[in-house]
Image (spheres, helix red, strand yellow):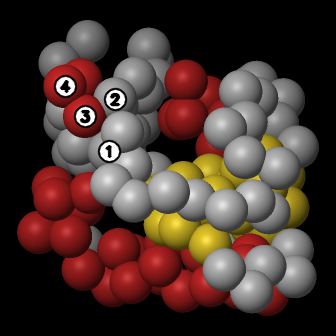
Amino acid sequence: MADESGTPQDDCLFCKIVAKQIPATILRETDTTLAFRDINPQAPTHVLVIPKVHHPDAASLAAAEPGVAADVLREAGEIAVEEKLDSYRVIFNTGSGAGQTVFHAHAHILGGRGLQWPPG
């Protein structure tokens, strides 16, 4: 199915999680966002925060719905507080060359261990 920003996609894993068609360990849910644990964690704490509306990446989300993009970042901060992270990283991968595997905008919150720079 062709991507139409803002419209749920039948073939999108994260759209299916938002619709509760696929289970996830949900930590927080707001009117505009959903936060859940990553099934392939790369750190002791690895949580994803996604917008409930479909946009293929962070740049398209920010261009189309800057308020929702801000909501994603605000929720990332709230997750860090709830998870008691004093240091953490928020990452948006954009494009397959950057490691994006699900083409629905999402932020990774990583913490609970030392994180090196540059990040690989």
Question: Under tag 1, what secondary structure?
Answer: loop
Q: Earlier in the sequence, mark 1 or mark 3?
A: 1
Q: Are marks 2 and 1 in contact (CB under 8 Å)?
A: yes
Query: What is the quadrant of residue 18 in the picture?
Result: top right
Task: Tell me the SS state at disc 4.
Answer: helix
Q: Is residue 34 left or right of residue 66?
A: right
Q: Which mark is residue 79?
A: none
Residue holding disc 1: 93
- How far apart marks 2 and 1 lie (CA) works out to 6 Å
> Residue type at mark 1?
Asn
Query: As rendered, which of 16 and 84 lies closer to the eye?
Result: 84
Q: Are marks 2 and 4 in contact (CB under 8 Å)?
A: yes
Q: Would you place residue 89 above or below residue 103 in this image? A: below
Q: Mark 4: which amino acid?
A: Gly
> Residue shown at 20%/70% (left/top)?
62
Q: Which residue is mark 3?
A: 98
SS for callout 3: helix
Q: Badge 4 local density, few (<14 within 10 Å), some, or many (20+)?
A: few
Instruction: Give left or right: position of 16 versus 27.
Output: left
Per the model, the C-alpha gap separating discs 2 and 3 is 4 Å
**Residue 39: x %, y % from top left:** 76, 29
Q: Which residue is mark 2?
A: 99
The residue shown at (25%, 34%) is: 98
Q: Tell me the tag on residue 97.
A: 4
Residue 82 % position (x, y): 87, 81
**Amino acid type of the residue tagged 2 in the rendering:** Gly
Q: Using the numbered discs, state the Cα–Cα distance from disc 2 to disc 4 in whole angstroms.
A: 5 Å
Give SS at disc 2: loop
Do callouts 2 and 3 mark residues in contact (Cβ within 8 Å)?
A: yes
On the image, the x and y values in percent for residue 1 come to 26, 12
Give the quarter of the figure containing the C terminus. Answer: top left
Q: Mark 2, residues whose alpha carbon is within 10 Å: few (<14), some, or many (≥20)? A: few
